[in-house]
Each structure stands twice: as structure tokens, then as C-alpha cells.
Amino acid sequence: MSNKAPIDGYVDPNIPNPNGDGDAPIIIYGYTPNLALAILAIVLFALLLFIHIFRLYTTRLYAFSILLIFTTLCEIVGYVFRLRSTAPPVGNPYGVINFVVQYFFIVTAPVFLSAAIYTTLTSFIAALSGHNNASGARKLSPLGLSKKTILSIFITIDVIATIVQVAGAALIGVSQSNRKSPDTGNNILLAGLAFQVFFFLVFLILLFIFIRNSRKVMLSTNTAEGGRGTVMQMYTFALVVSSLLVYLRTCFRLAETSQGIGGYASSHESFFGALEFAPIVIAIGLLGWWHPGRLVGRNGLLSRSVY
């Protein structure tokens, strides 16, 4: 008895399947990716790449800037392969390798963005506590966690979650190519996303605890140092908004995956554009304009770098 499932999924009636060795019997995306969206994404992420390279040069905030540069590079590569999945003559929407590679890079990119957000929180803690004032840092840091502890915990969690997600996506691609049920891969993908959503929520809670703890310091800095506390609040606000956008994107991915292959969210590219592409572009743009290096980098408003 064959374990191959019947063909069940989206087939574009206007695009015949080339049925090559690397082609799935259906379009795994659930739609034919839009050419304009792919081009727009490549252009915007390329622009943001140059902005963050410039910020690296002017602020010398190496850890943060390099992470954002990796984020934009991953997004560009991901959308180039998504471009290769558009309709002919540009691409082939049935190609499995294009789907897997674009998924890998588009999913991996926010890991670097999240790591940049984590480093920003720790740099703000250090800046407001007087850089090397360990007792001051413990008072401001959520739950008294050290910078090293915050970074190691959340970066490790993101790496694990991403590995699980990519493994699930790859298994979906292989299953679809072999005309087998993709349920196992989808369940693995779902587990990785649920894990990531939960722990990013924990990070958001820690971020808001930091904001509560730092309010008095910001107000006193505003009075004593000619408005620097207000500037600090603006950068903190940009950090919060960027974090919420990343969380929105991750929640969308979880909801999309929970519906399974061919679900409503996964079969309508408008959701992808509004809840995957747009939040990440806006978050990276916010962190480019309100770049923490302008605050704590070389010649920043808080003068001495914490890196």
C-alpha cells in the first residue's frame, strides 16, 4: 500500500508544472509569489543594509550594527530566492529548493534582529547604571539578571527555535516533493514557533520591567543633563516598538502554521506581506533611525560606549 498522499494543494492554472527533479506537484507557498513584493523587499532591505553599514562606520557600535547587517543580508538572500519562485519567465513557483532556501533565510534573519534587540537592552542597562556600576546595573536589570545571562539565554533559545523551524520547513518541502503527507514537518515547525513565541513574550516582560525600573533614572538624567533622559526615552520607545513588531511577526507565523499547509493565512500572500515583510522592514528602519549607537556608541549622547 502506497504511503503517498494524493495531490492536495495549490496548483496555478496559468502556470504548468515543469515536473523537474526538484519540483513539487503543488506550489508549496499556497499561491504564486508576487514579483512586485519580492523586488520591493530586495530594494528596501538593500537600502537598510547601506544605512546600517553607515551607522556602523559613524557609531562604532559593532555588535548591534553587525547583527543588523546580517539581518538585512539574510532578508535579501531570502527574497532573491522568493523572486526565483515567482511566475515564469523570472522564476518557478514549483521549485522545492527555492521554497526551502527562501524560508531558511527569511526565518533566520529575525534571529539576528532579536539578538540586536537583546544587546540594545543590555547596553541601555549599562549606560543608565554608569557603565561599570555593577550594583546599579542589578537594580535596573529585570530580575537582577546580568548582561551575559540575558544574552546567553535568549540568543540560545532563538537559535534552537530557528533550527527546529528550518528542519520542519525542509521536511515539508521534501514531503511535498515526494507526494507524502507534510503533517510531521508542519508539527515540528509549529513546535519551534510556539517555543519562540513563548520565550519572546518572556523577553518583552523583562523589557517592560526594565522600563519601570529605569523611569526614575531617566527623569533624573533629564533634569541633570539637559534633556538626555527624554532622548533616552525616545530610543527606548523605538526599542519597544521594534520588539513588538518582531513579536507580531512571530505570532503570525505561529497562527499561519497552526492552520496547516493550505490554511487560509498561508494561502494568501497579503498576510505574508502585512505580517512578515512589513513588521521586519519597519523594525529595522526604526533601529536604523533611532540607532542605539547614536546614544551609547562613539561620540554618542551618553558619550562612552558600553561595548
Image (spheres, grey):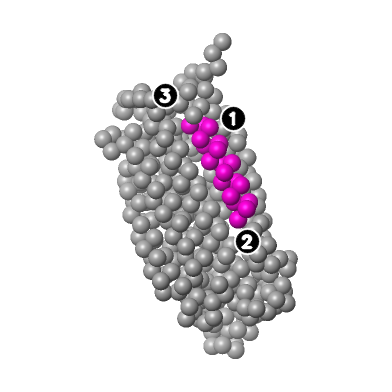
Name the dominant secondary structure of the magenta segment: helix
165 drawn magenta:
yes
Q: Give left or right: position of 153 versus 273.
A: right
Note whether 8 is above or below 33 in the view shown.
above
Q: Give left or right: position of 145 versus 240.
A: right
Q: Between residues 225 and 51, which one lies in front from this camera angle?
A: 51
- Give the labeled residue for mark 1: 184
Amino acid identity at mark 1: Thr
Note whether 257 is above or below 41 in the view shown.
above
- Give the labeled residue for mark 3: 25
Q: Give left or right: position of 243 versus 24.
A: right
Question: Label 3 crowding class (10 Å Cα cut-off): few <14, some 14-19, many 20+?
Answer: many
Which residue: 46% across, 73% down?
Answer: 60
Question: Label 1 crowding class (10 Å Cα cut-off): few <14, some 14-19, many 20+?
Answer: few
Which residue: 57% across, 29% down?
Answer: 183
Q: Position of residue 287 (x, y in %)?
A: 47, 65
Task: Write down the region rendered in magenta.
Answer: 155-173
Q: Between residues 127 and 215, which one lies in front from this camera angle?
A: 127
